[in-house]
Amino acid sequence: MAFAAELDGFLKQCESLAACEFATGDDNHLGTVLERYLRAVEAAADTEMLTSILLLDGHCLRHGAAPRLPDEYCSAVDGAEIGSNAGSCGTAAHLGRAIYVSDIATDPLWTDWRDLALGHGLRACWSTPIFDDKQTVLATFAIYHLTPRSPTSEEVRAIEKITEHVARAIAWSKGKQVLAADLTRATTRSAPSLRLVASADADQLSAHEIKHEFDALVDAIDAVLGKLARTEPNSFYIRPLQQAKAAAEKGKSLAQGHLSAD
Amino acid sequence: MASGVFNPGRGPRPAHVEAEMSAIALELEALVDHMDNEWREAGKISTESAQRLKDLHLRFDALFGNPGQSKPSGERIR
C-alpha cells in the first residue's frame, strides 16, 4: 500500500485551508496551496516519492508546485510543450489520459527528457491529467519514483482522489467565479477553519466552532504521531507533539464544557 | 539514483522540527489558557485568539509538510 490511511485526512485539511483562503482572500496564491497538497501527499506516502503539479497554459506546461524536485529540473520543465511524445506529463496533458511510465530509462515517451530526468535520479513518472468540470485539462499531477515501478490499483485510486482535490483548488483559484456549491460542500465536509473565520468576521465565535478547530488539530497531530510510531518511534519530536496534543485536547474539553453549559 | 546528484532526503532536520514543534506546543498551551480566561470573563472567544489558533494549525501543517527542503515554487506563477 503506497499511501497511509492519513491521506484522506491530510487532503481534507488542505481543502479546508484552501477553501478558507480562497473564500476570504486571506491568501489566494495558488502555488502555496498546491505545494501544501503535495507535501501532504508525500507525508502520507509509505514509499519514497516526489510529486509535482504542472499547470496547462495554452500548449505549454508551467510550473505549479514541486516541493522536493530539484530547481534545475523544474526550471527545465517549465514551459515545455505538450504533445504525443512529451514525457509523462506533456503526453498526459495532450491526450487527456493518465500516462504511467514505469521506467524512464527505456520508455520512448521520454526520449527528449530522458537525460535530464536520469541525471536527477528520476526513474519512473506517473502523470494524471486534472480536469475542470467541463472535462478540459487544467493541469497534470505527477508522482516520481527513484526506482522503476508501476502503480498498484490502490495507488491509482489514491491518485484519482488526489487529483479530485487538486482540481477543486485550481478551480477555486481560477474562479473568482468560485462555485458556491463547491465551497458549501467542502465546508460541510471538513472545513472547520472556514467556519471559524466566517464566524470571526461576525465576532461571534461559538464554543462549537472552536471545538471543531481543536478537533481538527488533534486529528492532524494524531495522524503525524501515528506515522512516526510506525516509521520513527524514537523521533526527537514525538514529545513536543504529545505536548501539543495535550494542549489541543484541553482546548477541546474546554469548548465541550461550554457547549454543555449552553 | 545517481549518487551525489540528488538527495531527496525526507523531512526537515529533526532539530529544526523539534524546535518549531516545541514552540507550537508552548504557544498552544498558552493560547488554551488565554481562551479559558476569555470564556470565563467575556463568554466568548476573541477573533484574535481564533486567528492565533488557525495560525498555529497552519504552522503545524507547514512543519510536517517539509518546509526545510522547500523552494518557493509558487513564485513562478505569481
Image (tube, helix red, strand yellow):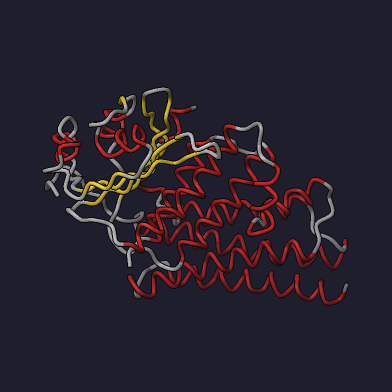
Q: Is residue A253 left or right of residue A9?
A: right
**Picture layout, residue A203 above or below residue A8:** above
- The x and y percentages for residue A49 are 29, 53
Asked where in the image residue A133 lies, by quadrant, the reply is top right
Q: What residue is rendered at 72% in x and 54% in y?
A: B50
Asked where in the image residue B40 lies, by quadrant, the reply is bottom right
Q: Quadrant of the N terminus of chain A?
A: bottom left
Q: What residue is rendered at 44% in x and 57% in y?
A: B64
- The x and y percentages for residue B49 are 72, 55
**Picture layout, residue A75 above or below residue A70:** above
Q: What residue is rendered at 57% in x and 32% in y?
A: A174
Asked where in the image residue A78 lies, by quadrant, the reply is top left
Q: What residue is rendered at 35% in x and 60% in y?
A: A155
Q: Is residue A62 left or right of residue B39?
A: left
* Total tally of numbered discs in the picture: 0
- The x and y percentages for residue A93 are 36, 34
Q: Quadrant of the C terminus of chain A?
A: bottom right
**Picture layout, residue A75 above or below residue A33:** above
Q: Is residue A116 left or right of residue A77?
A: left
- Which of the two residues, A109 or B52, is positioned nearer the viewer here? A109
- Which of the two residues, A214 or A118, is positioned nearer the viewer here? A118
- The x and y percentages for residue A58 are 42, 22
Q: Is residue A129 left or right of residue B6?
A: right
